[in-house]
Image (cartoon, rainbow, N blue to C red):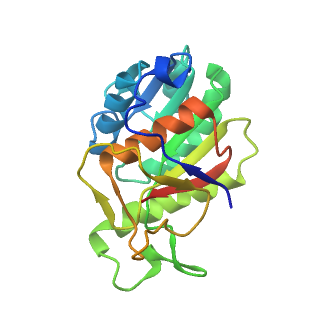
Amino acid sequence: MTAFLGRTSTATTVKEHNVKPKKIALFGASGRLGGAIAAEAVARGHQVTPLGSADADITDPTAVAKAATGHDAVVAAVKGPDRTVSKGAAALLEALPLAGVDRMVFIGGGASLEAAPGTRYLDSPQFPEAYRDTATDQARALELLRATDSEVNWTYVSPPPMHLVPGDKTGQYRTEARDTPVTDANGESRISIGDFASAVLDQIENRTFPRTRITVGY
């Protein structure tokens, strides 16, 4: 298991990080998480191209390749009906090599994390039916990424299964490559949206956790 401690909250620019500014194409920038990720990227000094469904259909490899060309990395934070998430993952894996982009951070779900060995949160009878289709599609996207032979250097980021809460960045979080939630001393798995966004940008800047699923918590 690989672990990474979050940055302190004072390190918020590419100059302070000693990182070259990057051009980031962000699918789903208008969503709650996408917006937070965009704000964190800009705060760190990166250039963000926000992409919504009107700009590029993430399920269309041709549209994805056109939108991603000229960028250093792509972040996908999308949801939608008709398997939008897994179709988007497939399109990205096909399109990004054509666009000359080898780094992708894919924002997935926390329900595919395991509540017990071999049992995901979404498999529980108590899991809310209103969210099951989306959670299943997010899990399907993870399976697709893990099975690919694409040259794309992807990282799939899962929030905690329940407690992704409003809040600013503290910089005090843990990022680990695992299929179970990161928990605190009380056994609770939680992260603020601000810290989650910060953890996503860490992956872009440091190129850590290649071709694996990670999750974040305090």
What residue is shown at x 45% (from left), y 49% (from top)? Answer: 85
Residue 159 figure quarter: bottom left
Residue 32 visible? The answer is yes
The x and y percentages for residue 110 are 44, 62
**In this rendering, would 118 be left or right of 40?**
right
Q: Residue farthest to the left?
A: 166
Which of the image's four quarters has the C terminus?
bottom left
The answer to whether residue 182 is above or below residue 99 is below
Quadrant in the rendering for residue 34: top left
Q: What x and y, as percent, mark residue 207?
A: 63, 35
The x and y percentages for residue 170 are 34, 45
Please name the residue shown 57% across and 21% down the image: 72
Q: Provide residue 37's location: percent of width, then percent of height.
A: 37, 36
Which quarter of the image is occupied by the N terminus?
bottom right
Instruction: Tell me what residue is drawn at x 37 percent, y 46 percent.
Output: 195
Residue 78: tell me if it is visible: no
11 vs 125: above or below: above
Asked if residue 77 lies left or right of residue 1, the reply is left
Front residue of this view, candidates 39 and 52: 39
User: Residue lying furthest top in this view?
Assistant: 70
In the image, 31 versus 217, the foreground residue is 217
The residue located at (52%, 22%) in the rendering is 68
How many marks the image carries: the answer is 0
